[in-house]
Amino acid sequence: MKIMVFDVGGTEIKYSVMDEQMHRTNSGAVPTPQDTQAQFLDAVYRPLDETLVYMIIYLFNGILINIL
């Protein structure tokens, strides 16, 4: 099973693909927008768009989002 994991913080939105053994691939980070909800959602969707091909190939089973 592979899931897309997000950690939303005040300065960065970190993301990664994880498996059952907690191995991470396709990791990265983008700045957390401070302006509008639309900009925030764009920042979250950007990593999803970048890993879309990966998602199709490996068939993710879910998405986890941690917001602090």
Image (tube, grey):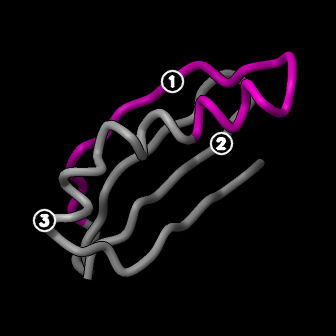
For label 2, the residue is: 8
User: What is the number of the mark on residue 57?
Assistant: 3
Disc 1 from disc 2: Cα separation = 10 Å
Amino acid at dot 2 = Val
Q: What is the spatial separation of the Cα atoms under label 3 and label 1, in whole angstroms? A: 24 Å
Q: CA distance from mark 2 to mark 3?
A: 26 Å
Residue found 54% across the figure and 67% down from its top: 64
Residue occupying the far left of the picture: 57
Q: Is residue 27 left or right of residue 4?
A: left
Q: Residue at the location (42% across, 38% down)?
A: 47
The stretch drawn in magenta includes residue 27? yes
Expressed as whole percent of the image width and height from the top left, the position of residue 22 reads 28, 69
SS for callout 1: strand
First in residue order: circle 2 vs circle 3: 2
Q: Quadrant of residue 35?
A: top right
Camera-side residue of 64 and 38: 38
Q: Which mark is residue 5?
A: none
Q: Residues within 10 Å of mark 1 (few under 14, many from 20)?
A: some
Q: Classify 10 Å Cα crowding around label 2: few (below 14), some (14-19), many (20 and above).
A: many
Rendered position, 33 above or below 7: above
Question: As displayed, is residue 19 above or below residue 29?
Answer: below
| Number of residue marks | 3
Mark 3 falls on what kind of element? helix
- Of labels 2 and 3, the one closer to you: 3
What range of the chain is rendered magenta?
23-44
Please state the horizontal and vertical placement of residue 40, each as a whole percent of the image.
Answer: 72, 31
The x and y percentages for residue 48 are 42, 46
Q: Which residue is mark 1?
A: 30
Q: Position of residue 44 (x, y in %)?
A: 58, 40
Q: Does the segment drawn in magenta span residue 29?
A: yes
Q: Amino acid at mark 1?
A: Val
